[in-house]
Structures are given as structure tokens and as C-alpha cells.
Image: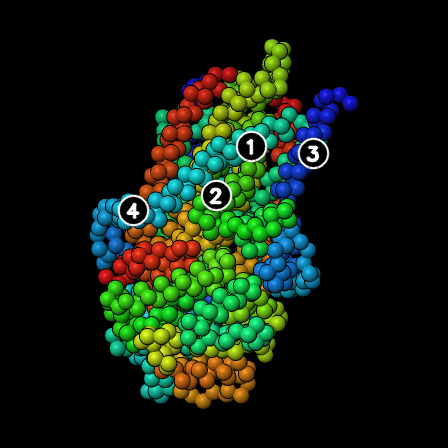
Amino acid sequence: MNKRKIKTIITVIGLSLFALVQLFPLYWLFMFSLKSNTDILLSDNVLGWPTVFQWENYATVFSRSTIPMYFLNSIIYSGATVLLAGLLTAMTAYAIARMKWKLSGAVFMLFVVGLMIPVHAALLPLYQVLYSTGLRSVPYLGLILVYVAFAIPMSVMILTSFFKVLPRELEEAAVIDGCSIFGAFWKIMLPLIMPGFATASIFTVMGTWNDLLLVQTYVDVNSLKTITVGVLDFVGVHSRKLGLIGAGLVAATVPVIIIYILFSERIQKSLLQGAIKG
Amino acid sequence: MNKLLSNKWVITAFVLPTLLFFLGIVIVPLFITGYYSLFNYNGLINIADAEFVGAGNYIKLFTGDSVFLVSLKNTAILIIGSVFVQIPLAFLLANRLAKGIPGEKAFRTIFFIPVVIAATIIGKLFYYIFSADIGMVNAIVRALGVPDFYFNWLTNPATAFLCVAFAAIWQYIGYHMIILYAGIKSISADYFEAAVIDGATGAKATRHITIPLLAPVVKTCVVLATVGSVKTYDIVVSMVGSGSHSGTQVPAILLWRNLFKGRLVGYGSAQAFFLVVVCLLLSYLIARLFKKSEENASQY
Amino acid sequence: MKKRFVTLLMVVSMLLGVMAFQPALADSAEPITLNLWHIYTDETDTQRIVIEEYIQEYEAAHPNVKVEQHILQDADYKNKILVEFSGTAESVDVFSYWGAGRAGDIYNAGKLLCVEDYMTAEQLASIKPGADNNFKYDGKLYGMPRSSWMMVLYCNTELFEANGVKLPETYDEWLDACIKFDALNIIPVALGGGVDDAWQAAFVYEALVNRIVGADAETIVLEAMAGFHDNDGFKEAAVKMAELSTARAFGKSPLEIDEFTSNAQFLSGAAAMRLTGSWFTKSIYELEESLIEGKVTALPIPKVEGGNGKDTDYVGGIIDGFFVNAATKHPEVATDFTYGLSLISGNRLHEIGDGFTAFNLPVDESGLYPLAVEVAAIANRAIDGFVAWDTFLPGDLADIHLDACQALLVPNADIGRFMDAYKAIFD
């Protein structure tokens, strides 16, 4: 066994331990969803198993007729936001990172400002703006527009930094081959930026899927609500089954993790392609 | 070439739609917030009937509001922790994974998972870890041989916010790791090949190639970490609540209280606007700090 | 082609003819949608069950009315109501809310409907005298009261007897009992005043104020929003609360305990006492984690020697209710609906021991749990009371009060700082 191999093994063990730590919240949440109130509130066994496995919590959550509808809505909101925001920000990030115009720095700073706005601050005025433009009455659209707008700064930042890292020669080569800048963008730059695109999309999804505040403020119709809101159906005024809420949270969290894992695959694929091309 | 890159039509087509979206939904409300901050407004009455106080709300921020100053201090703790602990850790992990290791894909996927889990869940988890009565930490210390150990991690003002910061910083390590990882992977292999020829590998390669070329990406992470620290909310509330008793409040909590619970829309707007200005200043400072390294990177 | 056209014409004119007869019926019953907003998210909650049943009955009795529910959890609900009422709140017709200062904000913005103008004399007379104090502004009724609650000290008789501790009737006995239980490693008073349930911490303070200052003086000060610092009783109440906290009456880390944890502590028998509202009686009998059914008695808040509180003073009252948006398109229907809802809710909650109805009409008390009967007996003796301050004061002042009370649970609580905080409210 040479030194290198030992080093690798130790590294892998270290990383594995860290991986266990990162996975702990999921394990904990799952156990939480199967515990009774007494187990959760009174026993000091955070790591431990429930004394009685309350599988009926999951039965209750999934027997609700509203759950599939909420799921579907979450998917619609997140999906639409990713596509729309992704397209808009890829174009804008490219323009800021690679094209020459005086205002590029200022526009970039403008987006950065957007990132800094604590949502609570904009909530009330934004509501008043949307209200007066009548956008609230169109199903889905109002909230999607809000999600896209709030996803823009992050996406622009990530994509800009990725575009900047690409070598200058790429556009020159494309132009020599007879492409317009537009063509260069679509055919060459965009495919190369896929890792960044997937990364930005993950963040976009995170901002929309787990969101509670915006959905509750801008959506009144029950048939348009998302799964994160759905979990609150189990929250009572003076008494509540915490395990039931936990089960709801598991139901709301697992899909995001699955979406994330799928996107992770995409990053991996794109990176392999990128490495070969580059 | 330069002419092509300054084509006004293409630039407009690429930028205008995004800009319009953004201005309408994010910037306009921000200015409205700024406008409200000049009044004694409770959100229910007509703004036209509200009393104009000019800079009054802003003066109150610094003279009458001790909890606001505490919340700013807490934000500073979060920023320092993320920039000097979270991001370096994330870089080490990203770098190690990017170099290639068995199980790289799995590790990368797993490390990010806490980020995907809602902050309220993470907050509750850490409540059960640090709780004095039923928490894991105290239980472990007791099991390790200190039978009467009992410490109020979450309510002792000296440790309370540090525990919250710990949770917040831990949750987002994977966040920065993934950004840095993609950045490292985007660095063309040519650079590393050239380095090998020059005799630089391993740590040397990291120092002279990876880090400088990664500068724009690191800047992104630093800005995100800073801004994220300012906006922290859910994890604090679910871990210790929104009260002021143990010095754990953050600006977003105060904003929520003032704007919604307390109906102090005018004052809350002033706090919000002030925070935005602070963030702007911080971003500007960060941008200047990084400017040098970016110029170096684009020379390659 | 022509034939088809003529047929079409005939069909259309027939339809028009038929429709011409409809107006007589349609006019008297145009379709109405009422938007009801409330915070009862849990479908097993009695109030929610009452709402669902009442909506069905009402829609059956009034076929042209459709009721749409909008349900949000408490904290988010308050956000949403503010956001809605920052405009005209056109999607809000009827909503559950709290009277006095809270609804007062909406009243001051001119957005509350004066329901009195749309009620019959009979309906108005059915409300118990004084029950609507917190729902009147400028002498007129702007909302419907529902039911009242009362603060009691629940005691686990088994723990008291087994350990030879006397059920406390005075503050001194209470403090003594707490010290004894603490020494036995039993949580003396389960109090969920930590985290975001500061209102429970405020309960202790308000209970002591009730006994030291007395309900009458308390009411005068709160309604005038002045005189707090002139009455030493307010300070003494804070001193005593800090004394209890230091003696570990509320456990070793009261600031970490929220309402549900403290409920669990008491229901499992880990705690000897629980200071909370009369709604808790139901939990003792109905929650599966309750191991103490039949082992609990309810006591009035312990008296303080030398205090101005009368034996007939109590903490509690009627503050929850239903309100109507002034901009509603159907004020008569909305008011009629709201009256019925409040009446039935109040009575039903009364019948299960979850409150005391605000209305005069007969209630069936036969189904009450034994403990609820005990609590009702205390309530029947009570005359003057005051509600929890955070339900009375407007939002921002309520927060100051809640924060201050919670701070009394900190070790070595700073009484001077506590008193200073109230200058923002009362001066």
C-alpha cells in the first residue's frame, strides 16, 4: 500500500463521516415524523427511535385530497420559474460578462441590490403594485412573475461569473466561422455554461419550492396553493400532533431532494462534455 | 470583434426584458418602501393621511432602538463566520472533490442536502441539539462523565446566538461548495497541464492557478454569504423564537415584527431601507477588494 | 341553410322566452359569495368543525349564498390581514380577529363594518351585557363576540397528595409549593412562555397584576393607557414573578419551553401545576398523551396578601370574535351570517367546556367534563376581569409587553428595565 492510497482512504473516510453529518437532518426529520408528542417533547433522545412508530401520520397526510393538487402546483411554479428565469438571466449574464457597454457594471450592481432586499420589506408595496395592475387575478401568473423577479439577481450573479471564466477566444473563433454574436451565444457559450445553468436552476428551485411567505401573501385561491402551505393544515391553535407536521414536512422535502439529485446528474453530464470540448 | 461585442441591438434584446421584470417587481417596491419610511404609517390608513416625519424614523433607528444594534452585531457575526469559516471549508471540500476521488458524485450530492432542507426544519433540529433540558449536547456531556452537566446554550446571552450562527453556517457549507466546485471544474484543463510541465502540482497548483482563476466565483460566494447573512430569518425563529431576551434577534425578525405584527410600517420600512443601503456598501467594498484579482484572471 | 337558421331562431327565442320568466325568481336571490377568513387550520379543532357545519346549514337555508373559506395559520394570518386591509380587502368579507386594540387599528382606518346597523333588536339583545365591551367603538358595535376564557391554575392532585404539598390558595403557599416540587425534581409550574409563546409568560404577570392591583384599577389603567407608573402594584407583580422564576417555579429553562412542551409536561405528569386558559380542560380529557385524566383540579389564581384583587376578580374575558369588512358588497347577509356563526360557536364551545358563551340563549351544559364543571363554578363566581394584554393592545405595544414579560424569566431579571419598557406604552 503506497502513501497515496492510504491518503486517499483516509480522505474518503473523513468525507464519509462528514456526509453522515449532512444526512443527519433527513434521518432526524423522518424519525420525528414517526414520534408521538411525548417522545418529541419530553425525552432527551434526539437520535433515538420512536417508542411507538406512528405510521398513521403518513396515512393521514397522504389521504388528504388536497395533497396531489398542492404538489402539482409546487411543480408548476418551480418549473415555470426555472425556465423563464433561466432564459432571461442567461442572456443578461452573457451581455454583462462578455459584451462591451458602458452601463454593464451599473446594471449588474442593480441586480445585486435586488438580492439584498429582505423580502419582508418589499412584501407590502409589492402587493399594492400587483393589486393595482390586476395581475393577482390571473391564475399562477402573478406569483410566477414574483418568483422570477426574485430569482433573477442570484441567477445573473452565478451565470455572469461563469461566463467570465470562459476564454475570450471562443467568440473570436465563432465569428471567424461566420456566426453572429447571437449565434455564438446560442451555439457555443450556452452549452458550455450548462454546469452554471444547472447550478443557478437549483438555487431558483430552492427559492420557490420552500417558499411560504410569498405564496401566502399573493395566493388566495386554495386550488393554487403549494405543498409548503399544505403542511400548515396540520397546525392547530392550542394542540397539534408534531409528528403529523413532520410527516407533512417529509412529503414536502423529499421531492426537492429528488429534483436536486436529478439536476446534479445534469451537472455531472455537462461537466464531462465540457471537459472534453475545452 | 469589438464592434460585434458592442452591438446595441443584441445588448438591448438580451438585457431589457430581464431589466423590466426586475425593475417592476423588485426595484419599484423598494422605492415605495423608501417612501413609506418617511412617514408614520401603519399600513391600514391611506398613505395620504399619514403623518410625514422625514428622517425621524432613521434617527430613531440609532437613538431609540437598542435591539436593532444588537441585531446588527448578530449579522456581523454571521458575515464573519460565513466569509472566514464557511467559504474556506467549502473551498477545501470543493477542491478535494474536483481533483477526483472515489464516490465524488455521491459526496457532492450529499454535501448539498442540508441547503435544500427548509431552514425551519434545520432550526428545529438544532433546537433539539442545544436544548438545555432535552438536548443532545448536554446529554452527550453527561454520558461522557459529567453527571450534573446542565448548560443553557440557547438562552444564555453569551452562547445563544453563537449556537444559531453555528446552525446557519453549517447549513450553507454545501451551498458555497457547489458554486466553487462548478467554478473549479470550469477552469480549462490546459492550465493544469501547463502547470504540470512547469513542475507545479498539488498545493502549488491550487495556490497559483485555482485560487486566482476562481476569484470571480469566490467574489460571488462572498457577496451571497454577506447578503444571505443579512436576510437570515427562518432558522433563528424556529430555533430560539423572535424574542429579545437572549440577544438572538436579527434584522429580518425586527422587520417582520415592525411591519406586520406591530403595524409600524413607516419605521420598519426605514429599517429595511437602511439594511439595503448597508448591503450596497458592503457589496461595493467586496467588489473593490476583488477587482485586482479579476483583472489578473481575465489576462489569462 | 335557411331551414337550419329558422330552427335556430326558434330555439333561441324559446330559450329567451323561458328565461323571461326567470327574473322574478332570480331577482330575489342573486348569487352571493361570502369570503370567510379564519385561523382554524386543524380540522379536528372544535371551532373548525363548528364552522364547517354552520356553513353547510347556512348554504342549505340560503341557496343563493356560497361561502368560501380562507384559512391561514395564526402568525401568517396576521400578516395577510394587514396586507389585505392596506387596500380595500375586497376578498375579505368576514374574518376572525381580536377586538379592542387590534381591531381598533382597522376601525381607525375606517375599514370595519358597523354591524350594529344591520342587526335586529332581538339579535342585539341576545348578547350578554358587557360581553361586547371589546367590540364597541364610539359606543357602537363593530364586531361579534364569541366566547370568553378564564385563566385558572390546574393542579395535579395526585402529585400534591403523594408529596404532602398543600394546594395553594395564597401566593406564599404557591411559592412554597414550587420550592418543594423543585426539590423533588418535579416541574412545579409547566409554563410555555419561551420561544415564541411569550403570551404565556405574560399570563403570570397578568395573573399577579390581577391579584395585586385588582381588576378594576387594572381596567382603568389599560383603557386610559396611563397611570401604570403611578400604581406600585404593577412593579410588585414583576418582582413577584421574578421571585417565582428564580425559585425555578417554571423549571430550569423556562425560556426554552413553548406551549406544546409545557402542555406535554403537565399532561404526562412531569409537572405539578399549569397556569393557562380554561380551554386546556379539553386537552386533559381528549389528547392521547394525557395521563392525568381524573387527577386534576382547577384553582383560581392564588391571592396575594395585601393585594387589591377581589376574590371575584379573574383574568380572561371576551376578545376573540368575528368581524365584517366595511367594504363588503353584502353587508346584510354578511352580518346575518356572522351573527349566527358567533352565536353557534360561542354556545358550542361553552357546551364542551372550551369557553363561556357571550350570548344569553340557552346552552346545554349536560355534556361538560367534570373538570369543566369545576372551572365553570369558578367562572360563575367571577365578576370583574381583564383580558390578556397582548390581545387588548395594538400590535407594536403588545410586542413590547410580551418581550418585557418574557425577560422576567431570565435569571436575575432586571426590574428597572422592565418598568422602563412600559413607558413606551403608557406615557
Question: Marks 4 and 3: same chain?
Answer: no
In the depicted structure, whether residue C293 falls above or below residue A20: below
Please give left or right for residue C26 compared with residue C41 in the image. left
Are both tags, 4 and 2, on one chain?
A: yes
Name the amino acid type tagged 2. Leu
Asked which quadrant contains residue A109, the reply is top left
Q: Mark 3 points at which residue?
A: A13
Give amino acid for label 1. Leu
- Closest to the camera, between mark 1 and mark 2, is 2
| Marks 4 and 3, how far apart at CA | 50 Å
Which residue was labeled with disc 4?
B61
- The chain under label 1 reads B
Local secondary structure at mark 1: helix
Q: Looking at the image, which residue is at 49% across and 20% down?
A: B297
Mark 4 vs 2: CB contact within 8 A:
no
Check disc 1 and report the residue beneath it: B89
Label 3 near label 4: C-beta < 8 Å? no
Residue B118 at x, y percent in the picture: 54, 49
Classify mark 2: residues with Cα within 10 Å, few (<14), some (14-19) or many (20+): some
For numbered disc 3, what is the local secondary structure? helix
| Amino acid beneath label 3 | Ile
Which residue corresponds to mark 2?
Answer: B162
Q: What element carries label 2?
A: helix
The N terminus of chain A - image quarter: top right
Across and down, in percent, residue C363 comes to: 47, 87
Labels 1 & 3 near each other (Cβ < 8 A): no
Chain to which the residue tagged by mark 2 belongs: B
User: Which dot, 3 or 2, sits closer to the camera?
Assistant: 2
Q: How far apart are marks 1 and 2 (CA)?
A: 18 Å
Q: Which residue lies at the image location 42% right of the left edge and 75% below the top edge?
A: C170
Placement of C66 over or under B95, stated as above or below: below
Q: Which mark is residue C198?
A: none
